[in-house]
């Protein structure tokens, strides 16, 4: 036992980082299940497809999580989006939502406010959806309904 244990973990990060091809662009690592990930980057489409296939074959999300070494939350999020939209594709990273307050939407909001000046923004959003003026993809944000 010479060297006082200075070698424990000392140079191991160099080897570990080269295994995952680390770069300054995104830190990669290993999750609690042993799966490799890159921070801030979406799960590969091939893994997303396997998640959906396993779910279709009757596997529970917790089983899928263990099999593919992907967190439970990630599995649930991907399946939820798949059931909602039919897509396995990740949403866009960053950027802003396009402005969707078109003239008909703005006019409808003005009508709601005339009918009931104390209407809440969430009530406006609910009515826009219920009346088919907007759908989940183009509904204005709460802050947009205030303008």
Image (cartoon, rainbow, N blue to C red):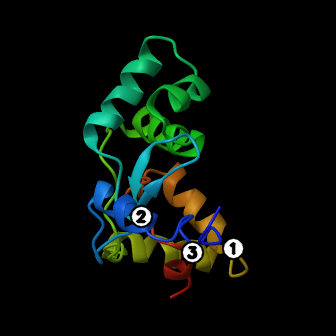
Query: Please, what secondary structure does the residue beneath circle 1 have?
Result: loop
Crowding around mark 1 (Cα neighbors within 10 Å: few <14, some 14 to 19, many 20+) is some
Q: Which mark is residue 120?
A: 1
Residue corresponding to mark 2: 39
The first of marks 2 and 1 along the sequence is 2
Residue at 36 percent of width and 68 percent of height: 14
- Residue 22, by quadrant, is bottom left
Residues 77 and 105: in front is 77
Residues 1 and 72: in front is 1
Crowding around mark 2 (Cα neighbors within 10 Å: few <14, some 14 to 19, many 20+) is few
Query: Please, what secondary structure does the residue beneath circle 2 have?
Result: loop
Q: How far apart are the two marked residues, 2 and 1, measured between alpha carbons?
A: 38 Å
Q: How far apart are the two marked residues, 3 and 2, measured between alpha carbons?
A: 30 Å
The first of marks 1 and 3 along the sequence is 1
Crowding around mark 3 (Cα neighbors within 10 Å: few <14, some 14 to 19, many 20+) is some
The first of marks 3 and 2 along the sequence is 2
For the residues labelled 2 and 1, say whether their Cβ atoms are less than 8 Å apart: no
Vertical position of residue 20 compared to residue 104: above or below: above
Residue corresponding to mark 3: 142
Vertical position of residue 20 compared to residue 81: above or below: below
Which label sits in the foreground, 3 or 2?
2
Q: Position of residue 78 (x, y in %)?
A: 44, 41
Residue furthest out toward the top? 57
Q: Position of residue 93 (x, y in %)?
A: 33, 67
Vertical position of residue 48 compared to residue 7: above or below: above
Which label sits in the foreground, 1 or 3?
3
User: How many labels sit on residues?
Assistant: 3
Which label sits in the foreground, 2 or 1?
2
> Is 25 left, or right, of 54 in this rendering?
left
Residue furthest out toward the front? 2
């Amino acid at each position: 036992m010479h060297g006082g244990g200075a070698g424990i973990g000392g140079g191991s990060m160099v080897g570990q980082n080269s295994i995952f091809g680390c770069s300054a662009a995104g830190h990669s690592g290993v999750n609690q299940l042993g799966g490799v990930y890159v921070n801030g980057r979406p799960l590969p489409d091939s893994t997303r497809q396997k998640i959906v296939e396993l779910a279709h074959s009757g596997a529970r999300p917790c089983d899928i999580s263990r099999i593919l070494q992907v967190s439970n939350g990630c599995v649930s999020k991907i399946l939820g989006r798949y059931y909602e939209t039919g897509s396995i594709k990740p949403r866009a990273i960053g950027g802003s939502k396009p402005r969707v307050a078109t003239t008909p939407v703005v006019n409808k909001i003005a009508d709601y406010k005339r009918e009931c000046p104390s209407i809440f923004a969430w009530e406006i959003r609910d009515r826009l959806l219920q009346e088919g003026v907007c759908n989940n993809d183009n509904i204005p944000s709460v802050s947009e309904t205030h303008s």
